[in-house]
Amino acid sequence: EHFGLISASGGDGVAQEGSGLVSADVGAVQVELDSGARARAVLLALDAANIDAQAFLSFLPAEAIVVAVIALDDGGNVMERFQLLQGPAPGGGEIPIPAAS
């Protein structure tokens, strides 16, 4: 697996931000939209902090619908595709949170 944390914010008329962590061997990260278009994320090496990974950051228009985040090697080959969930939670309601035991 090449992805670590993935987060996103924005929408509802505000530009969207997506960020996360990928392994140090990833050459590029792309964000795939529902239209099939892909936007390239910025990669930031974390070796100065003695972390064997990279951070990625992308900014997209508010109306963009992100469907996947894709890790590519230096030759542009897909290493991993992380599909994002779309739509309401299963069963049409909120995702249940287990009670503490």
Image (cartoon, rainbow, N blue to C red):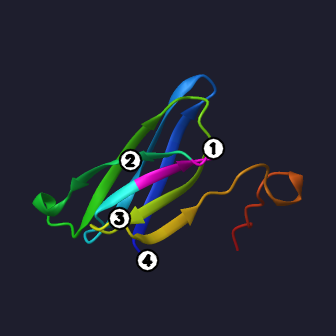
Query: What SS does tag 1 mark?
Result: loop
Q: Which amino acid does label 1 sit on?
A: Ser
Drawn side of residue 91 relative to residue 40, left or right: right
- Within 10 Å of the Cα at label 3, are there few (<14), some (14-19), or many (20+) other Cα atoms? few
Q: Does the magenta stretch include residue 100?
A: no
- Front label number (4 vs 2): 2
Tell me if 15 is positioned left or right of 51 in this view: right
User: How would you rate the neighbour count of disc 4 (Cα within 10 Å): few for under 14, some for 14-19, many for 20 or more?
Assistant: few
Residue 42, image x, y percentages: 30, 46
Inspect the image, locate mark 3, and give the three-letter code of the amino acid beneath it. Gly
Q: Distance between the residues labelled 4 and 2?
A: 20 Å
Mark 2 neighbour density, 10 Å: few (under 14) some (14–19) many (20 or more): some
Which structural element holds mark 2? Answer: strand
Residue numbers of the magenta segment = 30-36
* Inter-mark Cα distance, 1 to 2: 15 Å
Q: Quadrant of residue 2?
A: bottom left
Tell me the amino acid under the disc marked 2: Arg
Q: Earlier in the sequence, mark 3 or mark 4?
A: 4
Residue 76's disc is 3
Identify the mark nearer the N-term, 2 or 3: 2
Q: Gap in Å between the C-alphas at discs 1 and 3?
A: 20 Å
Separation of marks 2 and 3 at Cα, in angstroms:
12 Å
Q: Which of marks 1 and 2 is in front?
A: 1
What number is the disc on residue 1? 4
Q: What residue did someone put label 2 on?
A: 40
- Of residue 42 and residue 10, the one placed in the foreground of this image is 42
Name the secondary structure under disc 3. Answer: loop
The residue under label 1 is: 35
Of the numbered discs 4 and 1, the one sitting upstream in the chain is 4
**Residue 35 colored magenta?**
yes
Residue drawn where x is 76% and y is 57% of the image: 95
- Which of marks 2 and 4 precedes in the sequence? 4
